[in-house]
């Protein structure tokens, strides 16, 4: 019986195919495990030779009972969701447990199964040189058909495309194509091909960025892959996918590995102030695709992997044919689009082209909220970590078809030529092409410039947890409810919450709106004195408080529009919320240039009433002014 066996590894391929010479298996999403059964002895090992039997004693016991005196089986340990689908994130909480009590508890809470897909040795016979389909035929006879802890990973013959489409429909990870005549090769082979429906892969952790706001421990993990020369190449940052528990667990793993020297061959300017670690840890990351600049688009952390060695994380294994891919989409527009491959969100791999495509897609929902309103821009020509600057004036070379209007500024004592929101999707693309990541509209329209359309309550945390921002928003809602008024909440796209109260047109001045907003804000603070404040001076505010900012209700002041992306890691978007969603913890990082379209499909435009639900605050203003 062989003592040292290396697993056969599949080569990444980008397209499914049909062939009578191939078998097609479901790609399992768990931990690869070689099992060695030799009489009463049983060992399970990872692909990098780490022991697994002690971590999964239920599986070890079940494997020991298989009807063979000796065997070497190749398979995958997986945890299943309610649909019977495997996902690595389900098993991830188990794979680092070592104490017997914790493992026993996990066996009850997170049951796992062993899916066997190959047989290398049985009862004194070495099967590795036999054709795959013969090895699987013998394997199938060893595995009980009762659907217990040990299961046979069956296959489809010839029809790879149909199988891949079915797997894609159920949002599973992918398929593995295996040549039916292939022997078992202890290396990576083109006789086995992995074809993924979703992009998940393993990356070296080479550093981390500092935490932002109220986040603890670190901001994002810096990810790398090795090229053919053995150099570690930076491919992106994963800042999403963490909760407080996993942040702490990963921090405990990376902190002892901190080193002064950068392990990457080259370091992008925006991460040069990061903390470096010895490139030892490997993490699994889900992402949408590769950009043409060899960066991950929208990477999300799934978990650490100790069953894979860092040196095995290579471009050759992670990118089909060794070439990065991009899903660049041509947009029909009169705008001359430039530098679309420039990375704007380095942590997530989103480019300027992604920003433009987002605005192209969001235009039908966003335009009604910008229409007729003067716009102020904060331009980021080199992405969210580059230098940025505000712009109000439209340049002389602005095309004639872009809507602009001159408005008198009492602050500068001159006319400013503002961009004005237009029913024109090309104008949105023109603005995005300028590097203006988010839209900042006035609260009033040019036809009634002195009369805002709504009252804005800007809930801005000063290192306060988002739960406190939610609590302040709910108290604000309660006050509006008592006044028989209806407010509409949205994430700010950064760390706060905006609540809009639409009011009657051409009735209330900016001074009126500010007076009303201040009165409500002060009642909020009276009810939540420990966490809410209306203190304008930042240094006088208590750390951990939520600033109820009523001063956004001033002519010319702006906040980020609904459906605007923000210049923050994660490519978050200012997204409308339902008040019913406040009953559970919210995370503004869940609402991004990708996920916002799922919400629109499910809920429609939750902010549409802000344009139509006009409410009268004249009675309250009359009472306030009497005071």
Image (cartoon, rainbow, N blue to C red):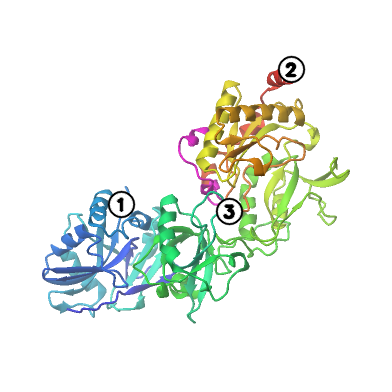
Q: Earlier in the sequence, mark 1 or mark 2?
A: 1
Q: Earlier in the sequence, mark 3 or mark 1?
A: 1
Span shown in magenta:
579-597
Whether residue 100 is visible, yes or no, is yes
Q: Which mark is residue 84?
A: 1
Q: Which residue is mark 2?
A: 626
Residue 341 inside the magenta-drawn segment = no
| Pick the front one: 173 or 24 | 173
Indicate whether 599 appears above or below 550: below
Q: Quadrant of residue 562?
A: top right
Depth check, mark 1 against mark 2: the one in front is 2
Q: Which mark is residue 333?
A: none
| Pick the front one: 289 or 95 | 95
Quadrant, the N terminus: bottom left
Q: Earlier in the sequence, mark 3 or mark 2?
A: 3
Where does the image place residue 599, in percent across and percent down from the top left? 52, 43
* C-alpha distance separating marks 3 and 2: 46 Å
Where does the image place residue 415, in percent across and percent down from the top left? 87, 44
Residue 590 inside the magenta-drawn segment = yes
Depth check, mark 3 against mark 1: the one in front is 3
Residue drawn where x is 61% and y is 52% of the image: 358
* C-alpha distance separating marks 1 and 2: 66 Å
| Pick the front one: 21 or 320 | 320
Where does the image place residue 480, in percent across and percent down from the top left? 59, 25
Where does the image place residue 229, in percent across and percent down from the top left? 49, 82
Local secondary structure at mark 3? loop
| Pick the front one: 535 or 148 | 535
Q: Which mark is residue 571?
A: 3
Local secondary structure at mark 2? helix
Residue at the extreme bottom: 229
User: Is 468 left, or right, of 357 in this rendering?
Assistant: left
């Amino acid at each position: 019986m062989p003592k040292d066996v290396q697993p056969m590894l599949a080569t990444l391929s980008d397209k499914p195919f049909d062939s009578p010479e191939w078998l097609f298996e479901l790609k399992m999403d768990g931990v690869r495990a070689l099992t060695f059964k030799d009489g009463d002895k049983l060992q399970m090992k990872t692909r990098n030779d780490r022991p697994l039997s002690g971590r999964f004693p239920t599986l070890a016991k079940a494997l020991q009972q298989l009807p063979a005196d000796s065997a070497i089986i190749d398979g995958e340990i997986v945890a299943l969701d309610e649909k019977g689908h495997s996902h690595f994130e389900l098993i991830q909480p188990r794979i680092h447990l070592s104490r017997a009590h914790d493992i026993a508890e996990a066996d009850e809470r997170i049951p796992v199964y062993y899916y066997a897909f190959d047989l290398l040795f049985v009862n004194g016979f070495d099967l590795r040189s036999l054709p795959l389909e013969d090895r699987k035929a013998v394997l199938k006879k060893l595995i009980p058909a009762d659907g217990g802890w040990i299961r046979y990973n069956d296959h489809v013959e010839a029809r790879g495309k149909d199988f891949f489409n079915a797997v894609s429909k159920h949002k599973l990870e992918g398929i593995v194509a295996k040549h039916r005549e292939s022997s078992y090769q202890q290396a990576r082979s083109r006789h086995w091909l992995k074809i993924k429906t979703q992009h998940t892969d393993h990356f070296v952790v080479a550093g981390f960025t500092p935490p932002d706001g109220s986040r603890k421990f670190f901001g994002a993990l810096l990810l790398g892959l090795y090229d053919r020369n053995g150099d570690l190449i930076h491919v992106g940052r994963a800042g999403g996918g963490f909760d407080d528990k996993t942040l702490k667990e990963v921090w405990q793993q990376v902190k002892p590995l901190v080193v002064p020297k950068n392990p990457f061959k080259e370091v992008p300017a925006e991460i040069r102030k990061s903390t470096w670690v010895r490139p030892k840890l490997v993490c699994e990351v889900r992402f949408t695709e590769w950009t043409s600049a060899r960066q991950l688009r929208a990477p999300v952390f799934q978990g650490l992997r100790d069953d894979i060695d860092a040196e095995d994380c290579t471009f050759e294994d992670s990118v089909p044919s060794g070439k990065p891919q991009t899903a660049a989409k041509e947009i029909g527009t009169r705008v001359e689009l430039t530098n679309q491959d420039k990375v704007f969100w380095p942590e997530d791999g989103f480019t300027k082209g992604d920003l433009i495509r987002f605005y192209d897609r969001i235009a039908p929902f966003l335009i009604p909220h910008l229409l007729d309103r003067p716009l102020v821009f904060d331009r980021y020509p080199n992405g969210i970590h580059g230098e940025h600057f505000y712009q109000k004036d439209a340049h002389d070379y602005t095309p004639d078809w872009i809507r602009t209007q001159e408005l008198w500024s009492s602050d500068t004592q001159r006319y400013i030529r503002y961009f004005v929101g237009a029913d024109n999707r090309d104008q949105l693309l023109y603005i995005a092409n300028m590097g203006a990541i988010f839209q900042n509209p006035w609260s009033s329209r040019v036809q009634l410039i002195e009369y805002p359309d709504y009252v804005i309550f800007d809930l801005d945390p000063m290192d306060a947890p988002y739960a406190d921002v939610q609590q302040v928003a709910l108290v604000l809602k309660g006050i509006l409810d008592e006044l028989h008024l209806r407010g509409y909440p949205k994430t700010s796209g950064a760390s706060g919450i905006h609540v809009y109260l639409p009011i009657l047109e051409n009735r209330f001045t900016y001074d009126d709106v500010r007076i009303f907003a201040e009165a409500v804000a002060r009642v909020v603070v009276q009810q939540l004195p420990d966490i809410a404040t209306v203190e304008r001076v930042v240094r006088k505010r208590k750390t951990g408080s939520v600033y109820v900012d009523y001063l956004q209700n001033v002519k010319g002041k702006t906040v980020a529009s609904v459906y605007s992306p923000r210049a923050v890691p994660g490519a978050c978007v200012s997204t409308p919320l339902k008040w019913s969603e406040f009953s559970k913890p919210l995370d503004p990082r869940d609402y991004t240039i990708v996920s916002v379209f799922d919400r629109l499909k499910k809920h429609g435009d939750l902010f549409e009433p802000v344009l139509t639900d006009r409410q009268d605050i004249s009675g309250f203003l009359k009472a306030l002014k009497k005071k």
